[in-house]
């Protein structure tokens, strides 16, 4: 089973590349944001718990998110693999995901981390903001803060997968086609 953590800062191209990888390798996309919204809409037990927490303005606990991911894995037992998007974001979450996958008889195959300089990320996100309607992609100060949060709080997770010899860093500059080719080369070598 091919299980990929697609990683990188806001604006690195994760969404675009994720869709290409899903199509090429017939993977299931596991976006924690999408899973949360789906569970809430479906009114599942975990979804109702998450909604109550979110309605208070709090973050949903790792236990609830892991429970939702477990449910998604169980509902897609014939999948060839998964792309994890937005989770894990911390070493504690990565350890919890490893334990869950181990119970399911699989593991993370690789973390593919897209590298892009901050100045390019800001340029890309401002351009995306012109078309996306996302307010957080229109304000350079907000964008800079999102990138800073990623660099300070999320980027250190790369060390967790580097220690497992599962980290591959890919240059996120260039054409979509070239970046996709570089990702495919790493995946095909696994």
Image (cartoon, rainbow, N blue to C red):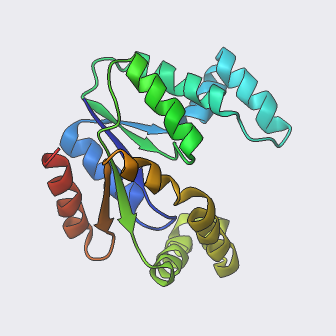
Place of residue 24 in the rendered image (x, y in percent of width and height, measured from the top left): 19, 45
87 with respect to 43 (left or right): left
Residue 80 picture quarter? top left
Q: Please, is residue 148 above or below residue 75 in the view?
A: below
Q: Residue at x 53, y 79 (%)?
A: 122
Q: Nearer the viewer, residue 110 or 183?
A: 110
Q: Residue at x 25, y 73 (%)?
A: 175
Q: Residue at x 75, y 30 (%)?
A: 51
Q: Please, is residue 114 above or below residue 65 in the view?
A: below
Q: Please, is residue 167 above or below residue 35 in the view?
A: below
110 with respect to 152 (left or right): left
Place of residue 135 in the rendered image (x, y in percent of width and height, measured from the top left): 67, 67
Q: Residue at x 31, y 48 (%)?
A: 165
Q: Nearer the viewer, residue 41 or 144?
A: 144
The total of numbered circles placed on residues is: 0
Residue 154 picture quarter? bottom right
Place of residue 186 in the rendered image (x, y in percent of width and height, measured from the top left): 19, 54
């Amino acid at each position: 089973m091919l299980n990929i953590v697609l990683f990188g800062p806001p604006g690195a191209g994760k969404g675009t590349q994720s869709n290409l990888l899903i199509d090429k390798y017939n993977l299931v996309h596991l976006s924690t944001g999408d899973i949360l919204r789906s569970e809430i809409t479906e009114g599942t037990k975990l979804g109702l718990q998450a909604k109550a927490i979110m309605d208070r303005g709090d973050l949903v606990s790792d236990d609830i998110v892991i429970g939702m991911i477990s449910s998604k894995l169980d509902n897609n037992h014939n999948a060839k693999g998964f792309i994890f998007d937005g989770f894990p974001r911390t070493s504690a979450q990565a350890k919890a995901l490893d334990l869950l996958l181990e119970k399911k008889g699989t593991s993370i195959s690789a973390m593919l981390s897209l590298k892009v300089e901050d100045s390019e990320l800001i340029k890309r996100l401002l351009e995306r903001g012109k078309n996306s309607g996302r307010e957080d992609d229109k304000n350079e100060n907000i964008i800079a803060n999102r990138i800073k949060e990623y660099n300070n709080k999320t980027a250190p997770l790369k060390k967790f997968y580097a220690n497992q010899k599962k980290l591959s860093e890919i240059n996120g500059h260039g054409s979509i086609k070239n970046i996709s080719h570089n990702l495919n080369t790493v995946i095909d070598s696994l």
